[in-house]
Image (cartoon, coloured by chain):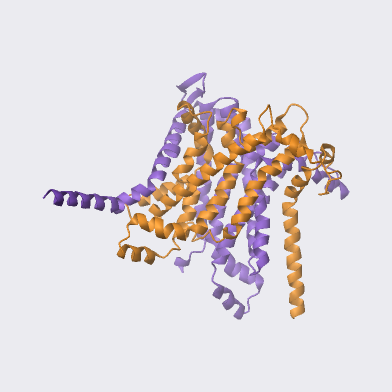
Amino acid sequence: MEQKRSVRTGNRLYKFINNENTVGNVFAFPFIFGFICFSLIPMLTSFRYAFTDYSLGTKTAEFAGLKNFIMLLQDEVFLKSLRVTLRYVLISVPMKLIFALLVAFLLTRKSKMVTLYRSLYYIPSLVGGSVAVALVWKQLFARKGLINMILQAQGLKGVNWFGDQKLALLPLILMSVWQFGSSMIIFAAGLKEIPAVYYEAAQIDGANGFQRFFKITLPCLSPIILYNLVMQTISAFMAFTQAFIITEGGPNNSTMLYALYVYNQAFKYNNMGYACAMSWFMLLVMGAITLIIFKTSKFWVFNESDQ
Amino acid sequence: MSEKRVIRKVIYHIFVLAFGFVMIYPVLWMISGSFKDNSEILRGTLALIPETLKATNYSTGWKGFGGTTFATFFKNSFIVTIIATFGTVLSSLLVSYALSRIQFKGRKFWFTCMIATMMLPGQVIMIPQYLIYYRLGLVPGYVPLILPYFCGQAFFIYQMMQFMKGIPRELDEAATIDGCSKYSIFTHIIIPLMKPSIVTTVIIQFYWKWDDYMGPLLYLSRPQSYTVSIAIKLFADASSITDYGAMFAMSTLSLIPVFLIFLFFNRYLVDGIRNTGIKG
């Protein structure tokens, strides 16, 4: 009798452990825990602080209503950083994706060398985010740096890259475009999945290289283009290290990327409440942009299930 | 015909290589700069071979700052990066298995949350996260740099889910019939078949974490606890004249682990990524 009962509870335990709900929650637990602790709670906290006056160590959070948001709209540096960031994103992301796609396409040939080449082009992505390369970049574009030497050798005048408001953003954009490797890898993986039959059929029909690229490759890749576009846009909005190290936002805030300004407000000037308001404003802007990308994607993303 | 083809092939290879050379030129320039004299670096010469080979840059650079050598900085970077990468792989594998293979209540909801996290700009939560850690007394310290990585990283969970879709479900079913539980299916079938995806995760997470600057900038304050990325920046911060040679020497060293891991795992990189589009 005793034994039977223990077998039954053992059975029940076994069933409970192997129940889909239990298994699912056990395996998903790290994410559920992390989502609540490291995303949800901070987001809600941030939202609350956005309506307060708060400085770490010196001032406890005091409710300030919409003051922070009103200040935002009057803050010239903020408005400038918003424009600068938009320019940075709008120029660097499309250029980066076009490069990534072209190079990925160029490297689809079946050849042992292709793997080597792909690694070569991936190297900038591999090291580009590092402080080391940012410092190299700063030196390359310095007044007496390599880029100016090349310009002068061509008979052109050297340019004061980081001293000119109109030009200072350009080295940062170039640095971002230079790191097209990670998008290229994702495109390369996508290109591999396009059935060779499509190309063979097109060849039989007499399509040339351009037609094959625009009629087969691009439509088949469009979902991946969408993915890369969204991910790269988001990461471009968050660009921080390069601006922090190379230009520190100058001259005259012409490279004051949004993330850098948030950082400065929070940790340099200790305006936590104001910085939280900025973060939330950024979230709204980016949410709107992502939404626009998704809404328009209906018109250019080719879905096999639609056919 | 065949001759034309050979010529085209040669042109292709020359073009791809030449362009590739231009691409990695800045990196090569940094490496050569690590053997150059300061005055030569500042003149901005295009040449990659130094006029006079100066290996002392490495020994001066290695001395570090205020008695803390680069041995310490490298050790710190390795500790943080290896633990965080391990955490990412482990937790992302678990979560991706749950989200793509187990029909539990709330699966759709958590999947949506995961996608949302992936698109959430880090800056929005950077400040409150900092404040929370600060209140818990964990600043300065390594915990904020490591702990979140044990909770699954949305980007990698998504990549792993994409990859897992390619593993035939029939394998799971066959194993279930043979009496395997969901747990042993995970350890005996899914993990071995996920190898390419795991490798991709290791490469990418390793160099993201190794290069990470903002995290250490926020959470580390004592020079003894600095990671390499923070330490290198100190060369440029010095109030006296920047020692470019030493800075490039340490920069070069700092990139070696990233290169090694890349060379070692490189052939898996493309295999480890599978796309079925964002709508998945």
Q: Is residue A280 visible?
A: no
Q: Colour of chain B?
A: orange
Q: Is residue A92 left or right of residue A282?
A: right
* Nearest the eye: A79 or B183: B183
* Residue B9 x/y as whole percent: 73, 71
* Residue A10 x/y as whole percent: 22, 50
Residue drawn at x 52%, y 18% as measured from the top left: A58
Q: Is residue A239 visible?
A: yes
* Residue B4 x/y as whole percent: 76, 77
B2 w.r.t. A125: above or below: below
* Nearest the eye: A6 or B255: A6
Q: Is residue B235 left or right of residue B270?
A: right
B126 w.r.t. B101: above or below: above
Residue drawn at x 72%, y 29% as measured from the top left: B238
Quarter-of-image position of residue B101? bottom left
* Nearest the eye: A50 or B96: B96
Quarter-of-image position of residue A97? bottom right
* Residue B218 x/y as whole percent: 57, 32
* Nearest the eye: A12 or A75: A12
- Taking the view exactly as shown, the residue that stands out farthest to the top is A58
Judging by colour alone, the chain drawn in purple in this rendered image is A
B58 w.r.t. A304: above or below: above
